[in-house]
Every structure is written in structure tokens, then in C-alpha cells.
Image (cartoon, grey):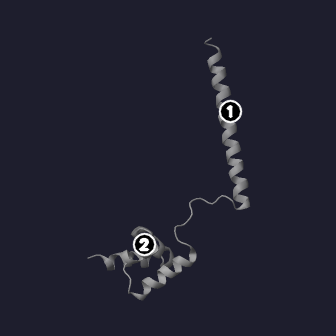
Amino acid sequence: PAGTDPILATFAEFEADLIRLRTREGMAVARAKGKLRGKQPKLSIKQQKELCRMHSCGTYSISDLAELFSVSRPTVYRTLARQLGAKSAHRLRRAEAP
């Protein structure tokens, strides 16, 4: 019985390697077809542009925008950072600090 354990372990390792290989191949095929997407954004492109436009008006605070778009304040900051560029967003946070 002691002699069969290493043989079974070898087969289990081989099977795990096959599963990994098939998974990678499947992901590569999905990526090539444009099907591998990841997490979907909370705001559409149109909503992101509208959020930036509303923020640039100066009449809405970050909290107001978060409430209007039903997202969190960090999501608003991330959206502005992507749209305005990282340096502008950093300045934005400092300007709003009390």
C-alpha cells in the first residue's frame, strides 16, 4: 500500500496541470473573441461624462453627485480621476478637504 501513494500523487498532480492548461487555453480563446470582460463599471461612458460635466459646473458637491448617480463617493472620485487625469483629481481632493 505504501508504494501506491506516490503514484496516485503523481496522477493527481498531472490532472491538476491539465486543468490549469485547459483553463488558460479557454481564457485565451475568450480574450481573443472579446468575451473576457471582468467587472463591469458602475457608470456608463455617458454617465461618466455627465458626472464630470456636472462637477465642472461647480454647483454639485461630490456627495451630491454620489447620491444623484447612486454610487459611493470613492466611485465619484475614481471617475473624475479617470476623466480628468490623476493629477487633477489629487488637487480636487485637496481642494475639498476642510
90 vs 56: above or below: above
Residue 34 is left or right of residue 98, and the answer is right
Of 3 and 63, which appears nearest the observer? 63
Q: Which mark is residue 55?
A: none
Residue 13 is left or right of residue 89, and the answer is right
Q: Which residue is mark 1?
A: 15
Q: Which residue is mark 2?
A: 77
**Label 1 vs 2, first from the N-terminus:** 1
Q: Position of residue 79 (x, y in %)?
A: 48, 73
- How crowded pointer 2 is (Cα within 10 Å; few <14, some 14-19, many 20+) is rated as some
Three-letter amino acid code at the position of disc 1? Glu
- Quadrant in which the C terminus appears: bottom left
Of 38 and 89, which appears nearest the observer? 38
Q: Position of residue 52 (x, y in %)?
A: 47, 81
Q: How many marks?
A: 2
Of 87 and 24, which appears nearest the observer? 24
Instruction: Say which residue appears at 66% left-offset and 58% top-offset.
Output: 36
Of 76 and 14, which appears nearest the observer? 76
Instruction: Say which residue appears at 57% left-offset and 75% top-offset.
Output: 45
Instruction: Say which residue appears at 71% left-offset and 56% top-offset.
Output: 30
Callout 1 secondary element: helix
Q: Position of residue 31 (x, y in %)?
A: 69, 58
- Quadrant in which the N terminus appears: top right
Query: Closer to us: mark 1 or mark 2?
Result: 2
- How crowded pointer 1 is (Cα within 10 Å; few <14, some 14-19, many 20+) is rated as few
